[in-house]
Amino acid sequence: MRRLWIDGEFTNGSTGQSIQVVDPATEEVVDVVPKGGVADVDRAVAAALRAFAAWKRVPALQRADLLVETARRLRANQEDFALTLTRETGRTLRKNRGYVDWSATCFEYYAGLIRDRRGRVIPSAEPGQLNLVIKEPMGVVGCIVPFNYPLMLIVWKVAPALAAGNTVVIKPASQTPLTTLDLNRVFDHFPKGVVNIITGAGAEVGDALVMHKDVPCIAFTGSTATGQRIYRMGAERIKKLHLELGGSDAAIVCADCDLEAAVRAVAWTGFLNAGQVCTSAERVYVEQPVHGRFLELFSALTGKLVVGPGLDPKTEVTPLIGSKERDQVDARVQQARREGAEIVTGGRRPEGLPKGWFYEPTVLKEEIFGPVVPIMPFSTFDEALALANDSPYGLGATLFSTDAKKVRRYYEEIQVGNVWVNDPLVDNPAGPFGGMKMSGLGRELGEEGLEEFQQTKHVHWDIEARIKPWWYPLC
Ligand code: NAD
């Protein structure tokens, strides 16, 4: 049984209760972990606060070395981490190996960045004055992540937060705490208390972390509903909030694009991780002249995708995270069917997989939320842009076109933070990721991702210490 990790020590937590972690592909219990409580949040935050006093003074070059060592340990344990990720998320082992490597790269990126980022010297407003803009850490950062990308989304927060000189308390989703608890192996060369890992229910442990008086900054990825709740709670103490929330991403397929490439790319964005990607294509708009052909090719491809467990190298589409989530998707598909939507392919549990929370990759002709790709026609580019922007969310979008004029209009007018052209879902550690509108606040990755965990001081220093003519005279 794995345990919580607070102040460099393993603990069973304060409640005596536990959480069962179930493999989505087999419905078997993989492990049981302690269900932490509010007392564990208090202990973890206290440890992180104590550690902060010394950690913030550790020179950036030394912090960078420790981050590079974390990257090395992640790679050295790549197979173990990938296997655990597959068991708890259901995702393919192949992809998970890649995510472990990607996570290591992210630590290396921030190790490099922090080596030469401390702020800047600006021109002074007066002679004899020195003006410094200093970037400082914030203190204890609470990192709360969802079930779909437990490792990667932790790393996107923890790597820049530690690089900037903060200490962290990490809370994973209850469905996927295993990889997170195993991270003690890649952090135990840091001073005690710099990294702390706790588990527990979002409404209890998550709330306590957000509300804690000694946690000035919360970095959260998850649903918009939970993000709204955290936003309200954070307002109480004017906390710095970093919120990565839900999306309703559009893909626009223009008639001038390479249609076969677009078909494969859209299937990738729609069915990767059973559609449980925040930037999954949830609405596909295809230009009228190629709509029929696109639908034909897309349905043929979708019908051939291999649904199965992530440990099977042949698997292309993995299960949903839980039975509740699978039932919700099915209920929505059936409702769309009752309302007259045409289900082009899929729309049910796959045959031959009696166990596990699998659902056939599904193509609809109308819009529906879920790991289901709805494909709709458009006539003009203006219409496509209006449809894509007609959403309260603004996380990501993809355009398939080789027409430079269209591409430029699209990236100038699309109201999302992640703008892809002909190549969806790719990330780059050096480039910011995040949403507009109700998809969140702030950015992860890149220089912007570091700044989320820094606060700014402006130092005005009169080196010559002269009396100013505008001061009051002495009597
Ligand atoms: P969720 O909001 O239910 O849970 C996310 C995390 O918040 C979990 O750790 C949970 O325990 C915790 N939590 C729940 N209630 C809380 C509370 N009251 N206070 C503090 N913490 C609380 O989300 P989920 O179902 O695990 O994940 C799916 C969602 O995440 C989807 O909406 C998806 O779009 C979104 N997501 C967004 C991004 C992005 O980068 N924008 C990336 C991945 C997933």
Image (cartoon, helix red, strand yellow):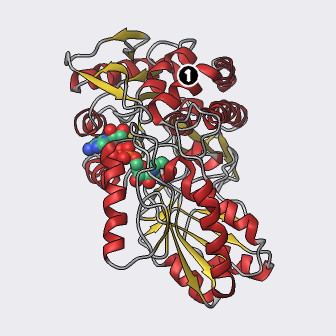
Q: 368 or 206: which is nearer to us?
A: 368
Task: Identify whether 346 is placed above or below 431.
Answer: below
Which quarter of the figure has residue 43?
top left
Q: Amino acid at mark 1?
A: Arg
Q: Is residue 40 visible?
A: yes
Q: Residue at x 75, y 64 (%)?
A: 261
Residue 19 position, x and y percent, is 28, 25
Q: 289 or 403: which is nearer to us?
A: 289
- Left or right of 140? Residue 412 is right
Task: Identify whether 245 is placed above or below 193.
Answer: below
Task: Identify whether 236 is placed above or below 393.
Answer: above
Q: Is residue 128 visible?
A: no
Q: 313 or 266: which is nearer to us?
A: 313
**Residue corresponding to mark 1:** 57
In what element is the residue under mark 1?
A: loop
Residue 110 position, x and y percent, is 66, 35
